[in-house]
Amino acid sequence: MTWRYRIYGLETESEINLGDLPAGDRQVASDVRIVSGPVPPLSTEASGWLDVQAGTVSVDLPPSGRFKIEGGTTITVDKAVTGLASLRWRLLGIAFGALLHQRGVLPLHCTLVSVSGRAIGFLGQSGAGKSTLAAHLQARGHQILVDDVCAVVSGEPQRLVVEPGHGLLRLWEDASAALGQDVGQPLDPATTKYEHRIPTVNRERIVVSALMELCEGDQIEINPLSAAQRMRLCLEHSYCREVMVDLGGRGRNLTQCAAVAAAVTGFSLTRPKDLNRMSNVLDLIEQSAARL
């Protein structure tokens, strides 16, 4: 028995039941197969959790399991020992990020929210507060579109278009508690991050109106980014950069990021990481979205 999903625009057939993800279409050929099978331990020459040999990517992410990603078409899952949420976190993140790079697709480490009908992508380092900010915008009536990985559609001159996501949101414990969410079980024993479902899953491609970089500071302000700064933003926040570099994809990544920088406006959002001042941050985001 297999399950069919549509993940980052790819028809995906899986030997593993991944739960309630966007459904695929069995009437069309699959782009990606997820299979269950043995994945050897990483070689002694591997750097930490990652090994790339002849274009095949192997990752070891205990306690979530080991994954092998081949040819942009196949992900082999060795085993996941901490449950479905942990497996989905790593599979839909790092494993699919590597697969997208193998397929020549640019994945941005980005959380996308529709604010007053305009899709705004929030970018920042892990822990910068992208998902927390998105959850608070959702509580104000805005719609979360994609969390964590935005797969950029190629061949769209003068606009930034991304594929729909997987319909899941991961929040730290304090953000979950502030929104009154039932946190349940953590994704794995090493983190206090929890999986939540996005209320309305978008199933169509999304035209992005702006990118916004999250920066930490005492003041709350939004400032425009130049084309060079937008280019730097895309380069820094290309998802799974280590994989992309080891696959020899730097040249393609430069070209893809330059196209994004030319196609969409960008801003920096400076704010303190203080939930007590979140309402002021949200006010400013809403005002900026209304002017786009």
Image (tube, rainbow, N blue to C red):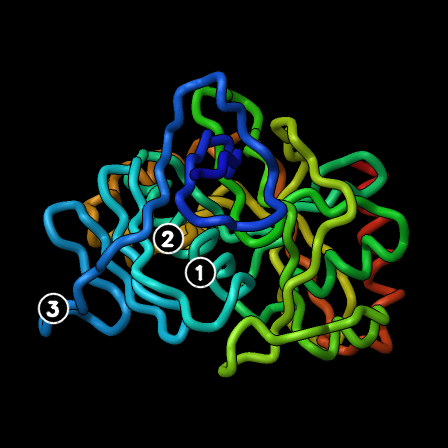
Where in the figure is residue 221, as x and y percent of width and height? 76, 62
Tell me the quarter of the image containing the C terminus: top right
Say what amino acid the circle numbered 3 marks.
Answer: Ser
Helix, strand or loop under label 2: helix
Say what amino acid the circle numbered 1 marks.
Answer: Arg
113 lies above or below 10: below
Helix, strand or loop under label 1: helix
Marks 3 and 1 sit apart, C-alpha to C-alpha, by 20 Å
- The residue beneath circle 2 is 95
Helix, strand or loop under label 3: loop
Mark 3 and mark 1 lie on one chain; the one further toward the N terminus is 3
Left or right, 77 with respect to 46, comes to right
Evaluate if marks 3 and 1 touch, with contact meaning CB atoms under 8 Å apart: no
Tell me the residue at 73%/56% (across/down).
134
Left or right, 74 with respect to 1, comes to left
Mark 2 and mark 3 lie on one chain; the one further toward the N terminus is 3
Q: Nearer the viewer, residue 95 or 80?
A: 80
- The residue beneath circle 3 is 43
Say what amino acid the circle numbered 2 marks.
Answer: Ala
Marks 2 and 3 sit apart, C-alpha to C-alpha, by 18 Å
Where in the figure is residue 286, as x and y percent of width and height? 85, 49
- The residue beneath circle 1 is 90
Tell me the residue at 84%/69% (across/down).
179
